[in-house]
Amino acid sequence: MQKNIICVSCPMGCGITVELNDNGEVVSVSGNTCKRGDAYARTECTNPVRSLATTVKVDGGIHNVVPCKSAGPIPKARMMDCMNEIAKAEVKAPVILGDILIENILGTGINIVATNHCPAK
Ligand code: SF4
């Protein structure tokens, strides 16, 4: 099987072709201009990951929510589960930028961290 993807690791946006065998294993990667593209293509075809950015509810803050993001990429297949987990969460004010709001979300090894402050009322 052949997959054509666009590398998003830099603004050049190289078109990459990945050949996969019947087991879904990468046989060859072509079209990439650098090694980052090779690594991106292999990950994208075998275990795609995405960064996550959203908000978490805050109790007792000057705002009801605080923006947050995943501290690293999360497997694409776990994104909805992680979003649901974040939607259920509520943290206490004050929140400081960089605070870990959810540690090791759903066992992914990735923390959800605040990307802004939310002082207490
Ligand atoms: S293959 Fe390399 S040069 Fe091309 S888009 Fe990816 S990172 Fe950029």
Image (cartoon, grey):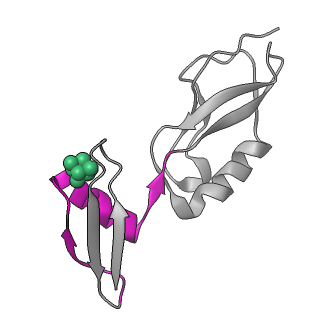
19 is higher (above) or lower (below) than 4: below
Residue 88 image offset from top left, x and y in percent:
79, 45
Q: In which quarter of the image is the N terminus?
A: bottom left
100 is higher (above) or lower (below) than 37: above
Residue 119 image offset from top left, x and y in percent:
72, 10
Q: Which of 67 and 10 is in front in this view?
A: 10
Residue 22 image offset from top left, x and y in percent:
34, 91
Left/right placement of residue 107 relative to residue 15 reads right
Left/right placement of residue 51 relative to residue 5 reads right
**What residue occupies the far left of the structure in this picture?**
34
Quadrant location of residue 38?
bottom left
Residue at figure coordinates x 19%, y 68% from the top left: 30
Residue at figure coordinates x 31%, y 50% from the top left: 13
Residue at figure coordinates x 38%, y 63% from the top left: 44
Residue at figure coordinates x 56%, y 64% from the top left: 77
**What residue occupies the far bottom of the structure in this picture?**
22
Q: Which of 100 and 23 is in front in this view?
A: 23
Q: Give the range drawn in magenta.
A: 23-51
Residue 4 image offset from top left, x and y in percent:
34, 70
96 is higher (above) or lower (below) than 89: above
Quadrant location of residue 107?
bottom right
| Numbered marks: total | 0
Q: Nearer the viewer, residue 43 or 105?
A: 43
In the rendered image, residue 34 lying in the magenta stretch gets the answer yes
Quadrant location of residue 89?
top right
Q: Quadrant of the C terminus?
A: top right
In the rendered image, residue 52 lying in the magenta stretch gets the answer no
